[in-house]
C-alpha cells in the first residue's frame, strides 16, 4: 500500500487520530497482522486524549481496519478481507491509482447483478416491473437525473424479483454508484443509448418478454463497456472527492 498525499483534512482531534492511524496502516507503518501501540503511547504520539482515541479505534474497528479484543493488543486487519464498501471513498483518497479498478468493479457488480435479477423480475411480475418506468417520460437530459433514475430502477427491480439482499448491496455503495453514474452520463452519447435501453426494457416489461430483456441487458453491457474503456483513461482528478 502506498500513498503520496494526505487523505483527510482533520477538523477535530478525532479526525486527526483517524487520519494518522488510517494512513499509517495504508503506508505499512502498521502492516496487516501487526499490533497497534498501547493506547497510552498511541494517544501521546498523536496528541489526543485516550477517550478520543478509544472512540476512533472503535469506529475503525467497525469499518474493518482493526480488530479489538478485550485484554489484548489491537490488531491491524487486511482491509481487503475485512472491510465493506463504506471505506471505498477513503481508499480512493488514499491512492488515486485504485480509481479505475474501483469504478470497473462497481460497474461490473451493477451490470452483472442486473443481468440476473431484472429478467427474473419481469418473468415473475411484469406489471410491477413496468410500473418502475412510470417516470421515464419525464426524465431530464442531464447526468444527475439519469444517475438518480438508473440507481432507483436497478434497486427497485431487486424487490420485484424478491432479491432484497441485492437491494442492500446497492444501498451499501449508493454514493459511489451515483458518482460513477454521473461520470458515465456526463457523455451525451451515454444518455442517448441508455435512454433507448430504458424504453426497450420497458417494452419487454409490457410484453412480459424476459428473454428479450436479457438480450437488451447484454447489449447494453457491451456498449457501455466500450465507453468506459475510453473514459477510464481520462478520469477527472477530483473523482471521489
Image (spheres, rainbow, N blue to C red):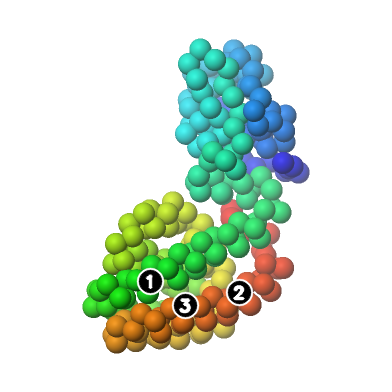
Cβ–Cβ below 8 Å for labels 1 and 3? Answer: yes
Question: Of the residues under marks 1 and 2, which one precedes in the sequence?
Answer: 1
Disc 1, SS: helix
Q: Nearer the viewer, residue 164 or 150?
A: 164
Q: Position of residue 183 (x, y in %)?
A: 57, 68
Question: Of the residues under marks 3 and 2, which one precedes in the sequence?
Answer: 3
**Quick one: label 1, few (<14), some, or many (20+) residues within 10 Å?**
many
Q: Position of residue 205 (x, y in %)?
A: 31, 81
Residue position marked by numbered label 1 in the rendering: 118
Cα–Cα gap, marks 1 and 2? 19 Å
Q: Residue at x 56, y 71 (%)?
A: 184
Residue position marked by numbered label 3 in the rendering: 217
Residue 191 seen from this side: no
Q: Residue at x 58, y 59 (%)?
A: 105
Q: Quadrant of residue 145?
A: bottom left
Which image quadrant: the N terminus?
A: top right
Q: Residue at x 54, y 65 (%)?
A: 107
Disc 2, SS: helix
Q: Position of residue 200 (x, y in %)?
A: 40, 86
Question: Of the residues under marks 1 and 3, which one precedes in the sequence?
Answer: 1
Q: Quadrant of residue 189?
A: bottom right
Q: Residue at x 60, y 74 (%)?
A: 225
Cα–Cα gap, marks 1 and 3? 9 Å
Cα–Cα gap, marks 3 and 2? 12 Å
Q: Is residue 158 above or below residue 45?
A: below
The disc placed on residue 16 is none
Q: Is residue 12 above or below residue 71?
A: below
Residue position marked by numbered label 2 in the rendering: 225
Amino acid at each position: 500500500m502506498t500513498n503520496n498525499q494526505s487523505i483527510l483534512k482533520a477538523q477535530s482531534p478525532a479526525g486527526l487520530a483517524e487520519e494518522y492511524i488510517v494512513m499509517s496502516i495504508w503506508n505499512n507503518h502498521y502492516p496487516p497482522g501487526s499490533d497497534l501501540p498501547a493506547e497510552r503511547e498511541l494517544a501521546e504520539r498523536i496528541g489526543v486524549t485516550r477517550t478520543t482515541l478509544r472512540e476512533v479505534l472503535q469506529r475503525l474497528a467497525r469499518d474493518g481496519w482493526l480488530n479489538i479484543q478485550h485484554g489484548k493488543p489491537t490488531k491491524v486487519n487486511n482491509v481487503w478481507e475485512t472491510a465493506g464498501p463504506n471505506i471505498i471513498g477513503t481508499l480512493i483518497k488514499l491512492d488515486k491509482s485504485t480509481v479505475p479498478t474501483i469504478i470497473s468493479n462497481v460497474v461490473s457488480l451493477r451490470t452483472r447483478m442486473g443481468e440476473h435479477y431484472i429478467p427474473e423480475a419481469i418473468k415473475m411480475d411484469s406489471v410491477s416491473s413496468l410500473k418502475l418506468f412510470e417516470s421515464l417520460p419525464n426524465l431530464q437530459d442531464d447526468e444527475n437525473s439519469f444517475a438518480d433514475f438508473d440507481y432507483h430502477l436497478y434497486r427497485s427491480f431487486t424487490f420485484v424479483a424478491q432479491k432484497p439482499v441485492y437491494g442492500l448491496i446497492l444501498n451499501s455503495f449508493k454514493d459511489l454508484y451515483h458518482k460513477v453514474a454521473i461520470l458515465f452520463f456526463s457523455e451525451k452519447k451515454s444518455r442517448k443509448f441508455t435512454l433507448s435501453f430504458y424504453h426497450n426494457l420497458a417494452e419487454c416489461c409490457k410484453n412480459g418478454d424476459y428473454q428479450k430483456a436479457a438480450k437488451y441487458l447484454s447489449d447494453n453491457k457491451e456498449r457501455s463497456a466500450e465507453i468506459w474503456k475510453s473514459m477510464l483513461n481520462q478520469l477527472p482528478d477530483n473523482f471521489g472527492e
